[in-house]
Amino acid sequence: MLTRSILFAVALTSFVSAASAAPNYQIVLNGSVHDVELDKEYKVPLAEGGEDVSFTVRVKEDQTFSDSFLSFSYKKKFSLTESGIHEGVNQVLLNSALGTIVIVQEYSTVNPSGLTSFFLNELTSEERAAGFTQTTKPYEKKLSDTLTLKGIEAVVEKGEQKIQYIVAAHGTDKTGILIAVRLDQEFSKSDGELIENFWNTLSIKLGSSTSSEEPKS
């Protein structure tokens, strides 16, 4: 069920991104409201009898997500959505059109460090049911001198197809973050920057204590 929900969210995100070309933006000049589209040039008179002023609304190439739990950067060509999936759980989904995914779940009432194996099994259940083999190993990602994410790295493969998953967590007493990454190696050249940029810019704002469930063989 979790995997289906994630895939549905990815499809919905792609649809919303495609629809964003419509004039969903407005600017207000001296009380006058103008509907505008991204990357389209407009001319508006500043005052009666005055010269027209040209302007274009653009989205910055480098986007930043930031809240009370963490912050990271991503390129505008990738899609980001945020939703409350359960009481006390907020989810941020960053994805490409090719199915590369970064999932961040923010827990405000529980430490999710013990959920890494469960989350990984949910993510890979459909591939394993389709005959993919899965191998796992412990995973650590040092973000600073005092903070290390811990979890599991898995590779599921069948024939020439190979998909990498990482599920890692960081938590304090009753709060924490769980991060899951999916990258099909077929798209590593085109989508690798999504994953690399996420890890390179990730900053976690919670405390430094960590714990994690050991991977199951």
Image (spheres, rainbow, N blue to C red):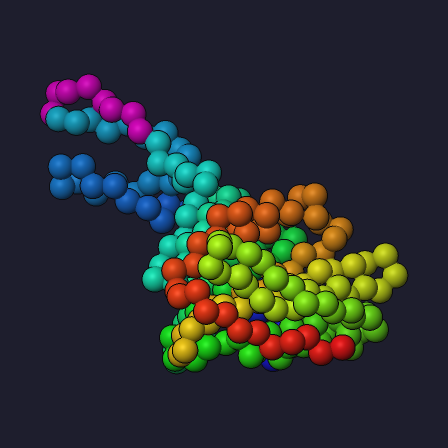
Query: Where does the C terminus fall, quadrant-wise?
Result: bottom right
Q: Residue at x 49, y 55 (%)?
A: 145
Relative depth, front residue between 145 and 182? 145
Identify the magenta region.
Answer: 48-55
Residue 59 visible: yes
Query: Where does the N terminus fall, quadrant-wise?
Result: bottom right
Query: Residue 99's x, y, as percent?
Result: 64, 57
Q: Is residue 29 above or below residue 105?
A: above
Residue 99 visible: no
Q: Residue at x 50, y 70 (%)?
A: 210
Q: Residue at x 46, y 77 (%)?
A: 111
Relative depth, front residue between 119 and 186? 119
Could you tell whether 46 is left or right of 73 in the image?
Answer: left
Could you tell whether 83 is left or right of 34 in the image?
Answer: right
Query: Residue 163's x, y, as percent?
Result: 74, 60
Residue furthest to the right = 159
Query: Residue 15's x, y, as percent?
Result: 52, 57
Q: How many marks?
A: 0
Q: For residue 23, which quarter of the picture? A: top left
Task: Please tell me whether residue 60 belongs to the stretch shown in magenta.
Answer: no
Task: Please tell me whether residue 53 belongs to the stretch shown in magenta.
Answer: yes
Relative depth, front residue between 51 and 202? 202
Q: Residue at x 78, y 59 (%)?
A: 162
Relative depth, front residue between 196 and 194? 196
Residue furthest to the front = 145
Query: Residue 177's x, y, as percent?
Result: 47, 68
